[in-house]
Amino acid sequence: MILSVGAWRVSEGMLPVSGLVAFLLYAFWIVEPVTQLTQTVSLLQSGLAAAARIKEIQDLPEERRPAVVPAPDEAAPAPERAPASPVLTFHDVVARYGPDAGTALNGVSLSIARRGHTAVVGPSGAGKTTMFSLMLRFLHPTGGTVRLDGVPLDHYDLDELRRRIVYVEQDTPLVPGTLRENLLYNHQEASEDDLWSVLRAVRLDERVRELEEGLDSTVSDTEISGGERQRIALARALAGRPETLLLDEATAQLDGLSESAIHDAIVKVAEHGAVATIAHRLSTVVEADRIMVMENGLCRASGTHDELLTSDDPYRDLVAALRIATVGQQRRRPQEDGAGVRPPGRPSVGP
């Protein structure tokens, strides 16, 4: 518009050419400040929205501590830690995510062995993740009780509870800082040898040695894939030698070799503690000591892989959908192989 009107005025002799050039230069110079001003307004709006979300988080109530310390005559029973006793038990547990929400668990009663690998399988929405949320007190049951060593979870301090029950989720966040700080996040007592041992267990030791600063490499400056994030999270969990390890789709983003490493790590933990695994990929749990099949918020069946194949139709359908061999395969436990490592050439699933 400036150019058009200015050219007309120049042609009429009402404006010198130098004046038109000056106007054009002023127009070019004012564009950048106006652009910056509009960008600043956008950033301000984003900042206000972020501040509102931060305020919402600050206003959230703290997680509940034990409501009442039991009186001496009402004290909780002594923890049951006999090898044969279960480490976690559900007694008619009902759970929902809101007062008006439907039930995610509908009277679940089950137990998780103190040692060994327990797998929880079932379709999406069956209540698998809800079970883990209850174990960690991310969610509180609306009916029934969840017990650890025979003691209701409400009697445990949150720090003690989450020290004993370690959770590796499907989306594995890393805290800002170095790899060392991530591994020592909640296990400051772990030694250098301990860190390399857990990295070796998840087959990350060679990858870390290749980094210029090794364990002191900054996470944000390092190219880390999704699968490596999952293995770092598992290594962080193993650094504390957990009594109970909860894994939610821990092999979802891993290749075959890395998945095998995770299986070997599970076997080692299961030798002295409890491992509970959620998986939609049944290839990760077919060698579990016990498999629980969840459906519509209930535990409809439990047993070994071979037992469930012959007794539970939904489990058989899940297996068939993933083309896992279902007939006549006798699987040896990894412990039977001597070193706890699956011999090369013996697949865990069918063709």
Image: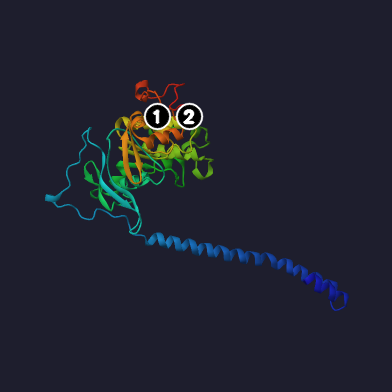
| Residue type pointed to by label 2 | Leu
Give the image location of residue 242, x and y in percent.
Answer: 32, 37
Name the spot of residue 86 as percent of width and height, x first.
24, 37
Q: Secondary structure at mark 1?
A: helix
Point out the tag, 1 or 2, that comes first from the N-terminus: 2
Give the residue number, with chain letter if any, for mark 2: 257
Classify mark 2: helix, strand or loop: helix
By what rule are the colours in the image chosen? rainbow
Classify mark 1: residues with Cα within 10 Å, few (<14), some (14-19) or many (20+). many
Q: Callout 2: few (<14), some (14-19), or many (20+) C-alpha neighbours within 10 Å? A: few
Q: Nearer the viewer, residue 142 or 241?
A: 142
Image coordinates for residue 48, horizontal then vertical, percent: 50, 64
Q: Is residue 138 shown above or below 204?
A: below
Location of residue 187 (image quadrant): top left
Q: Nearer the viewer, residue 148 or 333?
A: 333
Q: CA distance from mark 1 to mark 2?
A: 11 Å
Q: Residue furthest bottom?
A: 14
Q: Amino acid at mark 1?
A: Asp
Residue placed at 37% from the left, 21% from the top? 337
Give me the disc on residue 264: 1
The one nearer the camera, 128 or 27, is: 128
Front one among 257 and 92: 92
Residue 273 picture location, percent across and down: 30, 34
Q: In this image, 104 relative to 204: left or right?
A: left
From this viewpoint, is residue 138 visible? no
In the image, taking residue 279 as reference, residue 69 lies left or right, namely left
**How many numbered marks, from 0 up?**
2
Whether residue 168 appears in this view of the structure is yes
